Image (spheres, rainbow, N blue to C red):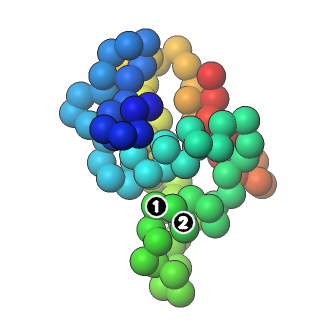
């Protein structure tokens, strides 16, 4: 991930079209916390910072995770880049 330009590369190939802003914020969260688990609360705080008190459904989080996985698999279907750690959250795979 090139955080300065908000560009994403897999195997030196740029993801095109770029990720949506929520997808990018989620991937950047996982990238910056590589090796650790990011909770659903961290995902909400990062992806939907203005949603405090309004609540974000589990389905919205799961749909975002699914869309990000789909986009990343466009360039590399053999790798699971977003790993679900049941009962805890998500981490960057690879």
Q: Residue at x 55, y 19 (%)?
A: 79
Q: Decide if residue 87 is on the left or right side of residue 45.
A: right
State whether residue 4 is above or below residue 1. Answer: below
Which secondary structure lies at badge 1? Answer: helix
The x, y position of residue 91, in whole percent, is 66, 41
- Tag 1 residue: 47
Which secondary structure lies at badge 2? Answer: helix
Which image quarter is the C terminus in? top right
Q: Decide if residue 2 is on the left or right side of residue 54.
A: left
Which one is in front, 66 or 15? Answer: 15
Which image quarter is the N terminus in? top left
Q: What is the CA distance from the residue labelled 1 to the residue labelled 2?
A: 5 Å
The x, y position of residue 6, in whole percent, is 34, 40
Q: Residue lying farthest right?
A: 87
Whether residue 83 is visible, yes or no, is no
Q: Residues within 10 Å of mark 2 (few under 14, many from 20)?
A: many
Q: Residue at x 54, y 68 (%)?
A: 45
Q: Residue lying farthest bottom?
A: 53
Q: Decide if residue 52 is on the left or right side of residue 88.
A: left
Q: Identify the disc placed on residue 44.
A: 2
The x, y position of residue 80, in whole percent, is 57, 26
State whether residue 59 is above or below residue 70. Answer: below
Whether residue 61 is visible, yes or no, is yes
Q: Residue at x 46, y 61 (%)?
A: 47
Q: Residue lying farthest left?
A: 17
Q: Residues within 10 Å of mark 1 (few under 14, many from 20)?
A: many
The x, y position of residue 13, in whole percent, is 33, 15
Q: Identify the disc placed on residue 16.
A: none
Which one is in front, 45 or 64? Answer: 45
Tag 1 near tag 2, CB within 8 Å = yes
């Amino acid at each position: 991930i090139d955080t300065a330009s908000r560009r994403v590369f897999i195997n030196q190939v740029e993801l095109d079209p770029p990720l949506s802003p929520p997808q990018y914020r989620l991937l950047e969260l996982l990238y910056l916390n590589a090796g650790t688990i990011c909770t659903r609360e961290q995902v909400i705080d990062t992806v939907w910072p203005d949603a405090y008190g309004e609540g974000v459904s589990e389905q919205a989080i799961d749909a975002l995770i699914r869309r990000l996985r789909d986009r990343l698999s466009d360039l590399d279907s053999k790798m699971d880049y977003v790993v679900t750690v049941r009962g805890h959250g998500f981490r960057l795979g690879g």
